[in-house]
Image (cartoon, rainbow, N blue to C red):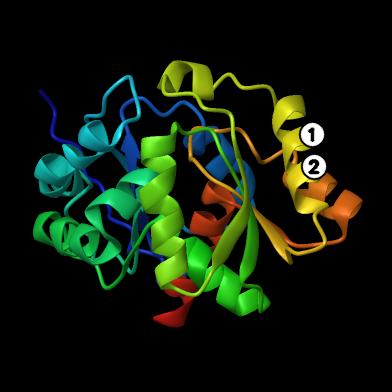
């Protein structure tokens, strides 16, 4: 074997890496993140966490045990300015504070966020507090999510769900169905924004269409998580 010379490039200080922990069952967030981060120079390194085929409170709670190991599978050389845990419903069941503690056990990061925490920050940034909430979840999953929003002063009195527990089916709910449901809920005059929950629900192609139709801000799990990760990444410069 010939040992050949090589040189090494320094890391680009303006292209700081971000970490993303994605559910094993999620088929949607990675392609949507490629869209949302298309103009960003910052790489997003992805780890997967074991998750169940059905979304129930007990299956979501089980991820508490494996979060540190999933975080530890991110590349270990950089210090991350932010790591996102990509599950809205599990964050409401486990708790954002606990999620942050568990992620920090597995990797070196300055900030930790998740879609629930990100949506709350995004709402505050936009000055909205009355969500029309659209979710794909069954009722036992919707309940802790709505309670988590309420604890942060966000109303979800206008609410609708597709009532689907199977992750594979959630990923295949048509964008047209999501578009029509979001417009229907968001047209209620008592709300000032729409939040479409679940990282596995396709929303990248409908957000702007719904917003144009109802004249109100439209947030989603994936879009809010992207927004918050970019905000936290840049805030550390």
Location of residue 111 with respect to 167 vertically, above or below: below
Location of residue 100 with respect to 85 vertically, above or below: below
Q: Nearer the viewer, mark 2 or mark 1?
A: 2
Q: Position of residue 182 (x, y in %)?
A: 73, 42
- Regarding residue 95, the answer to whether it shows in the image is yes
For residue 202, what is the image quadrant? top right
Q: Position of residue 91 (x, y in %)?
A: 32, 52
The one nearer the camera, 34 or 84, is 84
Helix, strand or loop under label 2: helix
Task: Name the disc covering residue 214, or none.
Answer: none
Location of residue 26 with respect to 84 vertically, above or below: above
Mark 1: few/some/many CA within 10 Å (<14, 14-19, 20+): few
Q: What distance separates the C-alpha of mark 2 from that of mark 1? A: 6 Å
Left or right, 188 with respect to 22, comes to: right
Left or right, 144 with respect to 203, comes to: left
Q: Quadrant of the N terminus?
A: top left
Q: Which residue is mark 2?
A: 184
Q: Which residue is mark 1?
A: 180
Question: Which residue is pictured at 55% across the width and 58% down the height?
Answer: 224
Question: Which residue is pictured at 22% across the width and 48% down the height?
Answer: 75
Q: Position of residue 204 (x, y in %)?
A: 67, 41
């Amino acid at each position: 074997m010939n040992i050949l010379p090589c040189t090494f490039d320094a890391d680009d200080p303006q292209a700081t890496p971000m970490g993303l922990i994605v559910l094993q069952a999620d088929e949607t967030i990675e392609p949507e993140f490629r869209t949302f981060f298309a103009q960003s120079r910052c790489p997003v390194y992805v780890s997967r966490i074991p998750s169940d085929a059905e979304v129930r409170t007990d299956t979501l709670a089980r991820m508490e045990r494996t979060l540190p190991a999933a975080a530890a599978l991110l590349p270990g050389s950089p210090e991350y300015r932010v790591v996102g845990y990509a599950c809205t419903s599990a964050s409401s069941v486990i708790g954002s504070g606990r999620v942050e503690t568990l992620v920090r056990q597995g990797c070196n990061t300055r900030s930790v966020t998740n879609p629930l925490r990100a949506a709350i920050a995004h709402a505050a940034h936009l000055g909205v507090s009355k969500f029309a909430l659209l979710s794909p979840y069954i009722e036992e999953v919707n309940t802790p999510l709505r309670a988590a929003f309420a604890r942060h002063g966000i109303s979800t009195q206008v609410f609708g769900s597709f009532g689907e527990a199977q992750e594979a089916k959630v990923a295949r709910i048509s964008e047209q169905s999501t578009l029509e449901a979001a417009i229907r809920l968001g047209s209620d005059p008592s709300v000032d924004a729409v939040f479409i929950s679940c990282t596995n629900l396709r929303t990248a192609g409908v957000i702007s269409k719904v917003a144009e139709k109802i004249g109100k801000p439209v947030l989603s799990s994936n879009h809010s998580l992207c927004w918050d990760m970019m905000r936290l990444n840049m805030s550390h410069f």
